[in-house]
Image: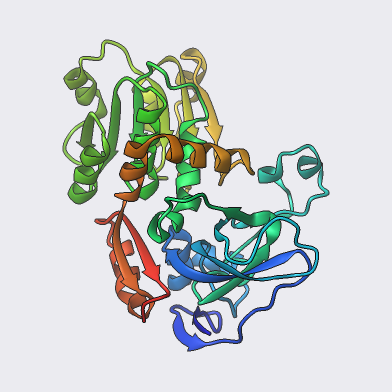
């Protein structure tokens, strides 16, 4: 099979022929149709310090995907050959305290598809049946490829009640863009989003943000005045990981405001903890998706709201043949596009 392959501890990938995987006990083999390019994949491709500490090459990366089940391992009960699926990329142990308590997203022995085991930048991938999410009708290959990051957006945005609340999102990358649509679906009053990329801010307006703020030119406080807000934001969704985003978000929260943090900072962030205490703010870390309540929530929302489905699908701005993976990675890295997807059915 064709696959993007990191052959050793060095930058770059190679598009090469690799042996097809086979489904083991409790596993399913999937013919990959589409794969999304994630920030994690950019780290692995560039072989930065994070990747060097997490990856044991050789490896086939890729964890955001959509495809068709073509083979069942022994013991598979519910998934069928021909099912169209996406995959939950976090494979858990099932026996640690959190797993046994039903908090699988907090497993202390998580192994990640495309990070600790071969992933979906390939024509075939194998995952446990328990990690395969079978889609209902109406999910396109492009939309199916972004269920993983859409789940991140849903998990983050639905961390706190949103009905009637004013929401600030920092970071208009693909997950931030999808969070706009989720917050609107969930009943938010005003939605503001920040970034420094003009194309992404334009995408944010199209998805449904009330105001898209270029923080290289305008402060969030000015945006509040433009929205007619007399007090601070009720809900903050920090998606960027930028060192200045969280402190400025804290400065613009209402007393009792609640912040969900998905963005991973590259270094320490200086926080005014006195303001966190005296303004009675709540800060909550988010990692991945709740398994599998988030998957049920996002599937239900997409089935019940065609407008939301269209808005989320619009976040995919580039779909390229897998053979053009280098152009796809360049596009994803420049920070001006929405989601970039590789098509493994078109070479």
Q: Can residue 156 be seen at all in this image of the molecule?
A: yes
Seen from this angle, which residue lies furthest top? 230
Res 233 → quadrant: top left
Res 130 → quadrant: bottom right
Seen in the image, is 316 located left or right of residue 201?
right
Q: Is residue 268 above or below residue 210?
A: below
Q: Is residue 89 above or below residue 7?
A: above
* Quadrant into which the C terminus falls: bottom left
**Image color mode:** rainbow
So how many labels did they put on this image?
0
Q: Is residue 47 above or below residue 100?
A: below
Q: Residue at x 31, y 42 (%)?
A: 311
Q: Nearer the viewer, residue 307 or 151?
A: 307
Q: Is residue 267 above or below residue 53?
A: above
Seen in the image, is 289 located left or right of residue 195?
right
What percent of the width, then of the height, locates residue 307? 32, 37
What percent of the width, then of the height, locates residue 100? 81, 42
What percent of the width, then of the height, locates residue 308? 36, 38
Q: Residue at x 45, y 26 (%)?
A: 272
What percent of the width, then of the height, locates residue 48? 47, 68
Seen from this angle, which residue lies furthest bottom? 17
Q: Residue at x 45, y 46 (%)?
A: 150
Q: Residue at x 61, y 41 (%)?
A: 290
Q: Can residue 266 be seen at all in this image of the molecule?
A: no
Res 342 → quadrant: bottom left
């Amino acid at each position: 099979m064709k696959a993007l392959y990191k052959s050793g501890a060095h930058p770059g990938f190679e598009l090469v022929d690799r042996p097809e995987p086979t489904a083991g006990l409790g596993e399913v083999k999937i013919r990959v149709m589409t794969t999304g390019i994630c920030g994690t994949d950019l780290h692995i491709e560039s072989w930065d310090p994070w990747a060097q500490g997490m990856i044991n090459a050789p490896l086939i990366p890729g964890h955001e995907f959509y495809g068709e089940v073509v083979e069942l391992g022994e013991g598979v009960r519910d998934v069928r050959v021909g099912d169209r699926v996406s995959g939950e990329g976090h494979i858990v142990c099932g026996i640690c305290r959190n797993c046994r308590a039903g908090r699988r997203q907090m497993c202390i022995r998580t192994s990640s598809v495309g990070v600790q085991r071969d992933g979906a930048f390939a024509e075939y991938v194998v995952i446990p049946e328990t990690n395969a999410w079978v889609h209902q009708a109406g999910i396109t290959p492009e939309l199916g490829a972004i269920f993983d990051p859409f789940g991140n957006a849903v998990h983050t945005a639905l961390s706190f009640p949103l009905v009637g609340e004013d929401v600030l999102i920092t970071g208009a990358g693909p997950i931030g863009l999808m969070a706009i649509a989720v917050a609107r679906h969930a009943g938010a009053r005003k939605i503001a989003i920040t970034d420094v990329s003009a194309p992404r801010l334009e995408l944010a307006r199209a998805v449904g943000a009330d105001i898209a703020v270029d923080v290289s030119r305008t402060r969030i406080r000015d945006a509040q005045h433009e929205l007619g807000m007399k007090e601070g934001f009720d809900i903050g969704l920090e998606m960027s990981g930028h060192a200045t985003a969280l402190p400025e978000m804290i400065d613009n929260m209402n007393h009792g405001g609640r912040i969900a943090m998905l963005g991973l900072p590259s270094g320490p962030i200086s926080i005014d903890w006195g303001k966190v205490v005296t303004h009675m703010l709540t800060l909550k870390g988010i990692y991945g998706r709740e398994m599998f309540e988030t998957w049920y929530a996002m599937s239900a929302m997409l089935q019940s709201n065609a407008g939301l489905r269209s808005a989320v699908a619009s976040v995919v701005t580039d779909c390229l043949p897998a053979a053009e993976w280098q152009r796809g990675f360049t596009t994803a890295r420049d920070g001006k596009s929405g989601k970039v997807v590789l098509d493994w059915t078109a070479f």
